[in-house]
Image: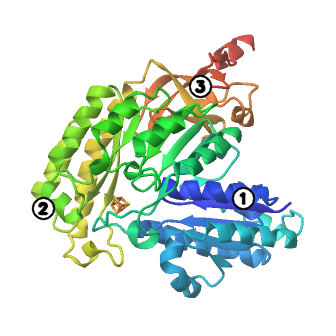
Amino acid sequence: MASIYIETFGCQMNEADSQFIAERATAAGYAIAEKPHKASVVLLNTCTVRDNAERRAYGRMQHFKTLKRADPSMKLVVTGCLAEQDRHRMRTIAPHVDAVFGTKELGELADALTAWRPGFVEDECSEERSLLLPMGGQADCIADAFTHLRAYVTVQRGCSYYCTFCIVPHVRGRFDHRPTGDILAEVRQRIAQGAREITLVGQTVNAYKDPATGADFGDILGAVAQCDGLERLSFLTSHPKDFTQKLVLDMARISRLNPRLHLPIQSASNPVLRRMNRKYTIEAYMEKVAFLREHLCGWALTTDIIVGFPGESEEDFQKTLALCATNMFAQAYMFIYSPRRGTPASHWPQVDSALASDRLRSLAAVQDRSCREFHQRKVGSVVRALVQGPSRKDPTKLAAKTVDNVTVVAPLPPTLDAASFAAAPWVDVRVEASYTWGATGTMLARSHAFTEPGTLVPSPTLDLITL
Ligand code: SF4
């Protein structure tokens, strides 16, 4: 049987696109391969938001060259923002890539998959290819048997805000909002396919405006929340400028909403925010967070921060550091500024790279304490979490995510295998230890639906006593 292996880099927009591709591929008769050496098509969905993401994508293309040498019938396909940006350059750097599709050519990509399908020989792994087993995926996300539990539904493409560091408007274009009816139809379809959690995604998701009616993001959240069978709802990524009081009040009316807001701050210094063209001040950001706390008490706040942005002084950096030291953020994605071709900030005098690295280390040390403290508060409680699949580090354990986005890892109960959790994917875990990355504990029960009481699972301790 023909199969497709999908590696995804970067943001949830790419994950949403990968889900679309996986769905079209399975409709065309492909199986989803969890290892590249077994696939007839290997697809890389790339990101270009930072230099590191670009280098990883080109590294993977070189890596897959060996697979193609072993089996020239395997097709290597590249899509995503790097494909959009480097379409011509890629032909020179990676001539073994069979096809490149930009972010607006997913329909053509799906058509190509369908066209290739009849030409594939039955799924057989040549001896030479089986020697290449160690080439496991190293992407941010690999499509597997649990992927359908979390569906990403795109509400908008592109962005019109032109932050001076960001490549997105240059490769994905300006805002293009989907009609509400299309979004609702896709949400219903995903629920019918087994999605337990729907995440509405857009580069600036809360700037959404229905092209015909002008309905805003709060309106669409409310409409999606009414869909039959929806268990949990989430959204990514919000811009502080559009995080209005109306939106908070709309959110407060939706009990199925996951209690986690990702609101990128980027810096706590106004001069830096101005140069970034972020369109808000630190005071405005704090006011919005205060309103959130007043109406949605207990929500986890997560953020993105860039250090070493051109012109960032020690004083600017200290403001960001001091804000993180207040334990305001349950989690922060922190990066050193990475110049992107064609963006204004790439032409400005750069902060010394050693200094930027020092700043990132100091910030990470402070923010890690904050993450650990957030996770520590869960120790001793029982959390309900949606399974992600076997732990990448130890397949005898299962990884799951709480509704406020904390990873919890617990040993698989005796007699239950990981695959059975795709059908009963909500697990109740007693949290016993916390770390910067998440928490560990013991699984007590599992259930088919978020609101159902859990059914007890075999306990490892009882098992030992029986023995
Ligand atoms: S809001 Fe700024 S950082 Fe976010 S996608 Fe748009 S331009 Fe990029």
Look at mark 2 in the image and give the residue it sits on.
Answer: 313
Identified by mark 3, the residue type is Phe
Look at mark 3 in the image and give the residue it sits on.
Answer: 450
- Whether residue 46 is situated above or below residue 237 in the rendered picture: below
- Whether residue 441 is situated above or below residue 140 in the rendered picture: above
Is 285 displayed left or right of 187 in the figure? left
Question: Circle 1: is it few (<14), some (14-19), or many (20+) Cα within 10 Å?
Answer: some
Which quadrant of the picture is home to ligand 1? bottom left
* Residue lying at 86% horizontally and 73% vertically, measured from the top left: 119
Q: Nearer the viewer, residue 104 or 436?
A: 104
Whether the residues at callouts 1 and 3 have beta carbons within 8 Å, the answer is: no
Residue 315: quadrant of the picture: bottom left
- Whether residue 104 is situated above or below residue 315 in the rendered picture: below
Whether the residues at callouts 2 and 1 have beta carbons within 8 Å, the answer is: no
Whole-percent x and y of residue 24?
72, 59
Q: Secondary structure at mark 3?
A: loop
Q: Nearer the viewer, residue 230 or 86?
A: 230
Identified by mark 1, the residue type is Arg
Q: Nearer the viewer, residue 382 or 157?
A: 157
Q: CA distance from mark 2 to mark 1?
A: 49 Å
Q: CA distance from mark 3 to mark 2?
A: 47 Å
Q: Which mark is residue 56?
A: none
Q: Earlier in the sequence, mark 3 or mark 2?
A: 2
Evaluate whether residue 134 shows in this view: no
Q: Earlier in the sequence, mark 1 or mark 3?
A: 1
Residue 15: quadrant of the picture: bottom right
Look at mark 1 in the image and give the residue it sits on.
Answer: 24
Extreme-front residue of the structure: 213
Q: Quadrant of the N terminus?
A: bottom right
* Residue lying at 27% horizontally and 55% vertically, measured from the top left: 360
Q: Nearer the viewer, residue 416 or 279?
A: 279
